[in-house]
Amino acid sequence: MSRRRLSPIVALPFVLRLAWPIAVSADPVIVNDITQLNPIAVARVVTPRTVDEVRELVRSHSGPISIGGGRFSMGGQIATEGSLFLDMRGMKRVVAFSPENRTITVEPGITWRAIQELIDPHGLSVKIMQSYASFTVGGSLSVNVHGRYVGQGPLIGSVRSIEVVLADGQLVQASPSENAELFYGSIGGYGGLGVIVQATLELTENQPVAREVRKLAVKEYRDFFFTEVRDSLTAVFHNGDLYPPAYDTVTAITWSATDRPVTVADRLMPVRDPNWADRLELFGVSEMPFGKELRARVLDPLTLRDHPVVWRNYEASYDVRQLEPRSRARSTYVLQEYFVPVARFDEFVPRMASIFRSHRVNVLNVSIRHAKQDPGSLLAWAKEESFAFVVYYKQGVTEPERKEVGVWTRELIDAALALGGSYYLPYQIHATEAQFGRAYPRAAEFFALKSRVDPDYRFRNKLWDRYDPPPKPATAAGRSAEWKLRSLKNYARSEDQTYLTLPEWYIVYSADEYAAFLDGHRPSEFPFFRSIGQFWNAYRAVLAETWSAYRFNWGYHAMIGVIGTSYSTGYAVSGLYEGSVGRLTEWFSRPESGAPETAEDRFIRGVATEYAAFIHATPWYEFPFAAKLRQLWAIPEVPGASSVRRWERRLSFTDELAFKSAWGWLMKKATQSAYDPEQSEILVWTRKPDGGPLQVDPPARVLDPPDAHSELLALPRYEPFTAAVTKLARRGVRFVEIAGNRRILMTVIAARDWKDTRGRGERLVEWDILTRPGQKRVAISVAVDRLHEVIPGLEAERVKIDHIYDY
């Protein structure tokens, strides 16, 4: 190859560097957060250094885009698979600084520490930030952080304006008075609307602050805070440390402005890596017996015994590296945060403590903060004046350990929501969609805004993949309607319930079959043991379907285990008894010789029919077993009927009714104490028909629609639900969601050789109807939005719609 041909090739990298001065990783790479729990394979990582580079990247890339800074979020909020990952740490310039006006304009990749180093010589301090200065400004804005500042709230309260690059590459300035919706959506918007490339922040005076420490019983803390701290003219920082495992003592730490001379010469904390003493303390508190008590009673009192005076910037410049363990391979340290209205403090603490203790959560500390009401963020975590509970805990990294964290996290979220509170979004994504909707009731507005400024859903991460997944496409109105509905208290129900109710209904079907069988057959001929096998086979299919797809519902599976064991035991005893003693007394009754049937046989058959009809709509334990027992002993003898058969039936059925009466009473008491009363209606989202308003038959009701293109229906639950949905589907009504879900289970009755479920749904399980030769039940998982096609199609093939399983 000649030098003439070689020269352009050698020069090519330099030409590209001049034309595209961005650091790029071309191969797929893994990005992760501080916990190391969320590795995500992105298409490439790019580190832009100017606003124009960000705009060009956004305009030229057609796929998903994710945004990251210091990567201190803990649930995948920085990325999604296959995305172009913008590492914003390359944009760290100070654009403008006005000591006179106490403002600073910065790019998003700059850290709070870098700002502190610049403004400290001018006697200024950051107005609102986290306790640790290691975070980037862009990341802090995206999650709308708060700190320990007395009389302040979320970070948005100190932001004058921001500049955002939208999905079309447009650069937009936003403030409370200009493009306000974008301002209040982008701050705390977790990168869902665009790339924040610049922010103007308010500063405040740097001043000496002195520390005061009070140890209080937790029940004294709220009154102490309101009396001594909340309205103080000098208090600057405050937090309360709530100590595990008792959660009954708070160390209240307040830093107040003072005229006393500083006792620490450094104006900012020296930056250092953790030493052996830091890591030994971390290990001891989290793993050693009585380590938490040692911290509460010895280590912290020693650390906090003095009354130092430091600069405000010093106390605001902690380095998060001081908390970093040597390894996160087997366990990791994680945060969560919950917000509760200040008036509900004393109610939340014992609930939180009970959840921690019942799940043996390895909590190192709960830091109590205070925050004023958010001024208007669309995803505001402080909808009113609140106490924040920052939970620092240790967990394992295996899948079972992570699932267990999800269980108690959802319990804590429910505890906060029940008191009018919320939870913080930067951490592990364990909340259900319904919990998210209740905690963030303005999410519908946020998603409607996203649909306008990012119509192709390009700005993505694991948070938005979870709660606002990419549409197929969907319109802005459709997504807005969805989140309006999800914010309704009784709208969403867990989708796994449609499957978990199948074993219960199998028992109902079995009662039907037994009652029908007795009308023309002897009890000893009923296939009791095959019925037991069918029940557990149906449950096995349900378990396989729900095991990995949904959070494991321990309570419901335990309930199925109890009723399944009870059902199996009852049928096994009946099978053994009827196959021996029952069969013998059948022989004594001589039915083939024309001897009359005993009144007891007729009575038992009638009770079986009545019981089967009863449990279609009412829990089995409500059946009047005791009354039936009294009626049994009042039956007159039929002349000519076998007295042996009569007394055997009477005594055996007495035992059965007496046992079921007692067992039913216990089950009723247990159910009433363990479960809230069930809702009698279920909410259904449908498309508005073309021919005008949707008409429904009572007891179904039409409610206020979520938007102009939709209807919201309240349908009766349980067996009437099947009839209501079937009738609507026959009329061509297009379902969108049922109880917030997109899949539903249905059973059909078909000929034994029927196999065609293709194009209709996924076959879950099927079983022969033991008392109807040639017929079977088939359980099919169906897409809700195809019910208007599936149900008429099945009926056209003479397949009977047996039951549709509500949630």
Image: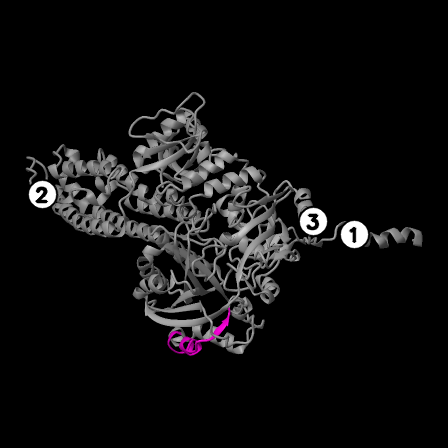
Residue at 51% in and 50% down: 188
Badge nearest the viewer, 3 or 2:
3
| Disc ID at residue 424 | none
The answer to if 300 sits in the magenta stretch is yes
> Looking at the image, which residue is at 36% across and 43% down?
489
Residue that appears at 7% across and 35% down = 638
From the viewer's perspective, is 322 left or right of 648?
Answer: right
Residue 437 place in picture, x, y as percent:
42, 45
The answer to whether residue 10 is left or right of residue 50 is: right
Quick check: 378 left or right of 245?
Answer: right
- The part of the image, by quadrant, that contains residue 211 is bottom left
- Which region shows up in magenta? 296-311
Alpha carbon distance from label 1 to label 2: 97 Å
Query: Considering depth in this image, is 615 or 599 the residue closer to the camera?
Result: 615
Residue wearing tag 2: 630
Q: Quadrant of residue 228?
A: bottom left
Residue 53: which numbered mark, if any?
3
Residue type at numbered disc 1: Leu
